[in-house]
């Protein structure tokens, strides 16, 4: 626990101007981001008697080890920078709304020549019109199925569309009148685009125009005694009315608004949003958050607005946003919303009438969502806490291991030896921090030696990160790679992608230490892991191993294992961690093996990519003919120069078969074409030729 006075800025250092501040922990990880109208006044609130602070604020300032700030010109800039940093750093003490599902939208790809209507999830794309979000994808499909009768817009994928273009035959929807079949030229690109715009107008709430037009056309067809056409138009009107009935009118005057309600208790808060377009509820969504800081309802609303509109622009931000409490101050938030929309946005609390009644409905939904969330999560939170406590008791740890890393070695009879590292924090997976390794120090099968190498490499990188940040001098320790004491630690590149980032934007691959290292194995693997940590001078990280046979927990230096009850939540969590590490390692090992089995002589040519390999095989027909070709003939292939041709010739000469194949029954020499090394068939033939005792044996 840190003393806030140890990193408190000196008087006069903090400017009295708007800005954004960051608290960092001892590992330089950002744990809290905040904004202030006056940085000096706001930060002074954190550096007071700890007894006067809210428990969660006290926990934050005692976890932090430093504070830094950035001065901006206006409060609107502070709001924008705060949102950007919260999204980038994911600080643990900030309010973060957990959306328990990816809500589906009805999307119309107006950025294509022939716009397509489809269900979309995830990030919004430029040039695509979105309607929703909806609670269920089937609700979108039901609505689209009704509207395609009147607006037969394309709904097929790019592959189906191109296949129909090639064959000149539309799909089933084209035959039954629910697609205008632009793939076969039944409608021009301009007319189809106009049809898609009419579909969007109807979905946006401008329904009266189309209903009146269809009813007028139906009456004209009836007067002209075109009864079949009149009946078809009657059914179209019925389909549109049925689609409209799915969203009852809740507000008059074709109102466009978002209503946000908050239900909260001392620990958590639930936010519910109703999206009203054209006076109808077009979508609903909700989030839940832990209140890890002392926060008002207005501040919760402000964070919800940031999450809701932080990446939106234009009409995606409605003219009116109704909330239960206003942020303090409200002007910067309202100005920020106006900038994102490009027009004035009204942010207010409804006082009377239909809007207040609808807000009460949204509030009831928020309250029910909070109750449901607490019901679902209570047992889960309790179980995870109990599991961590049981592990701490069993291994005699000072505190519960909030961060656990597990390592597993995988190979196939000593080939393609790889390792995995998975991370669990608070009993939950942190997949963005998973890592994988290739064993580089030796060849062959030796799980103990492999474990020692992986642990050494992982924690050498951790020490290198500490040295880089100035947290560790490293003068008294000698790295295991034999470099002199105090020298910079080696930073191997294990092909790691993602993870936390340094101040310069580069990934911090192994920046944070675990409280517990778990290895998949028994006493030998545990001893190897402990020895690797000791050689690096790390003595504050616990190590244990979980053996598969009897699910025994091994700790370093003990003759007997720790046996946890089969019903133990701690054992169950360790099993989950171990099994996840095994899955991740096996997946990587299989991918490497598949790549190796598909390799051929051309893969040994340095600098020769897939495109030129394909060109060579296409030109010569096989590797055998390519091997027999002269350098001048190889140069005839587009993209192959003389130097590359010489390299190819040398590589193929080295990999030439030692002797021709012979049929042992007849003595006949078999002239076999070498397989195309750019395909996947060779991998199947090698795999099929493995002895029975080597098939499927992976560890």
Image (tube, helix red, strand yellow):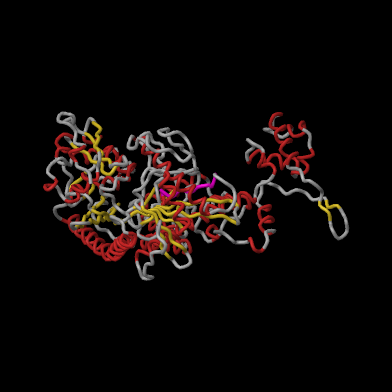
Horizontal and vertical percent position of residue 432:
41, 49
Residues rendered magenta in the picture: 432-440
Residue at 28% of width from left, 55% of height from top? 398
Residue 436 among those drawn in magenta? yes
**Going by the image, does 100 lie left or right of 666?**
left
Pick the quarter of the image with the C terminus: bottom right
The residue closer to the viewer here, 159 or 74, is: 74
Displayed quadrant of residue 248: bottom left
Q: Is residue 43 among the parts visible in the rendering?
A: yes
Front in this rendered view, residue 68 or 457: 457
Q: Is residue 427 left or right of residue 417?
A: left
Compare residues 522 and 313 and report the one nearer the observer.
522
| Figure check: 272 above or below 92 | below
Query: Relative to 394, does residue 28 appear above or below in the rendering?
Result: above
Looking at the picture, does residue 57 appear above or below residue 172?
above
Q: Quadrant of residue 406?
A: bottom left
Looking at the picture, how far across and down is residue 19, in whole percent?
22, 34
Q: Could you tell me residue 386's position as x and y percent?
A: 29, 63
Quarter-of-image position of residue 22: top left
Can residue 550 be found in the magenta stretch? Answer: no
Residue at image location 41% in from the left, 64% down from the top:
560
Q: Residue 640 placed where, x, y %? A: 69, 32
Is the residue 54 above or below the residue 379 in the image? Answer: above
Can residue 210 be seen here? The reply is no
Count all numbered tags in the image, as a single digit: 0
Whether residue 601 sits left or right of residue 113 in the image: it is right
Q: Nearer the viewer, residue 244 or 271?
A: 271
């Amino acid at each position: 626990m840190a003393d806030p006075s140890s990193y408190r800025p000196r008087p006069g250092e903090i400017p009295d101007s708007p800005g954004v501040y960051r608290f960092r922990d001892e590992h330089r990880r950002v744990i809290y981001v905040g904004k202030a109208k006056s940085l000096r006044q706001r930060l002074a609130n954190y550096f007071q008697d700890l007894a006067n602070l809210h428990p969660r604020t006290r926990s934050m300032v005692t976890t932090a080890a430093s504070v830094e700030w950035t001065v901006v010109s206006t409060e609107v800039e502070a709001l924008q920078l705060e949102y950007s940093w919260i999204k980038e750093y994911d600080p643990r003490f900030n309010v973060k709304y957990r959306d328990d599902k990816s809500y589906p939208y009805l999307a119309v790809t107006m950025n294509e020549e022939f716009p397509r209507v489809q269900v979309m999830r995830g990030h919004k794309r430029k040039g695509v019109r979105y309607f929703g979000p909806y609670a269920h994808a089937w609700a979108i499909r039901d609505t689209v199925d009704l509207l395609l009768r009147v607006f037969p817009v394309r709904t097929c994928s790019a592959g189906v569309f191109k296949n129909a273009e090639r064959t000149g035959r539309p799909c089933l929807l084209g035959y039954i009148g629910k697609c205008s079949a632009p793939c076969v030229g039944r409608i021009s690109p301009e007319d189809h685009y106009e049809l898609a715009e009419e579909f969007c107008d109807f979905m946006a709430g401008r329904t009266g125009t189309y209903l009146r037009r269809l009813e007028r056309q139906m009456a004209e067809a009836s007067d002209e005694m075109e009864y079949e056409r009149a009946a078809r138009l009657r059914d179209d009107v019925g389909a549109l009315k049925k689609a409209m009935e799915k969203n009852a009118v809740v507000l008059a005057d074709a109102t466009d608004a978002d209503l946000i309600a908050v239900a909260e208790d001392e620990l958590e808060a639930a936010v519910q949003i109703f999206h009203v377009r054209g006076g109808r509820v077009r979508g609903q969504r909700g989030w839940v958050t832990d209140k890890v800081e002392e926060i008002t309802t207005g501040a919760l609303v402000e964070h919800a607005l940031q999450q809701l509109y932080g990446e939106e622009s234009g009409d995606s931000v409605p003219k009116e946003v109704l909330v239960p409490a206003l942020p303090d101050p409200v002007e910067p938030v309202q100005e920020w919303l106006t900038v994102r929309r490009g027009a004035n946005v009204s942010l207010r609390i409804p006082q009377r009438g239909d809007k207040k009644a609808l807000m009460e409905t949204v509030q009831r939904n928020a309250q029910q969502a909070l109750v449901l969330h607490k019901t679902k999560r209570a047992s889960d939170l309790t179980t995870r806490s109990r599991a961590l406590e049981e592990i701490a008791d069993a291994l005699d740890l000072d505190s519960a291991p909030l961060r656990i890393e597990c390592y597993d070695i995988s190979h196939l009879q000593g080939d393609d030896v790889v390792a995995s590292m998975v991370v669990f924090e608070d009993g939950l997976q942190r997949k963005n921090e998973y890592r994988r390794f290739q064993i580089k120090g030796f060849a062959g099968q030796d799980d103990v030696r492999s474990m020692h190498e992986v642990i050494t490499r992982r924690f050498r990188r951790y020490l290198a990160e500490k040295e880089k940040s100035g947290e560790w001098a490293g003068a008294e320790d000698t790295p295991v790679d034999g470099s002199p004491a105090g020298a910079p630690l080696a930073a191997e590149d294990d092909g790691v992608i993602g993870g936390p980032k340094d101040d310069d934007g580069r990934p911090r691959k192994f920046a944070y230490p675990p409280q517990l290292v778990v290895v998949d194995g028994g006493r030998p693997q545990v001893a190897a892991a402990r020895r690797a940590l000791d050689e690096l001078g790390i003595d504050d990280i616990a190590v244990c191993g979980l053996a598969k046979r009897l699910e025994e927990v091994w700790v370093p230096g003990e003759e007997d294992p720790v046996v946890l009850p089969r019903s133990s939540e701690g054992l169950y969590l360790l099993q989950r961690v171990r099994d996840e590490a095994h899955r991740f390692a096996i997946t990587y090992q299989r991918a490497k093996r598949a790549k190796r089995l598909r390799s051929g002589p051309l893969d040994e040519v340095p600098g020769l990519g897939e495109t030129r390999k394909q060109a060579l095989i296409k030109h010569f027909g096989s590797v055998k003919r390519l091997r027999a070709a002269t350098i001048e003939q190889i140069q005839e292939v587009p993209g192959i120069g003389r130097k590359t041709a010489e390299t190819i010739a040398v590589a193929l000469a080295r990999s030439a078969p030692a002797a021709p194949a012979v049929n042992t029954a007849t003595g006949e020499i078999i002239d076999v074409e070498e397989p195309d090394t750019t395909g996947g068939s060779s991998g199947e033939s090698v795999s099929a030729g493995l002895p029975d005792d080597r098939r499927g044996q992976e560890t």
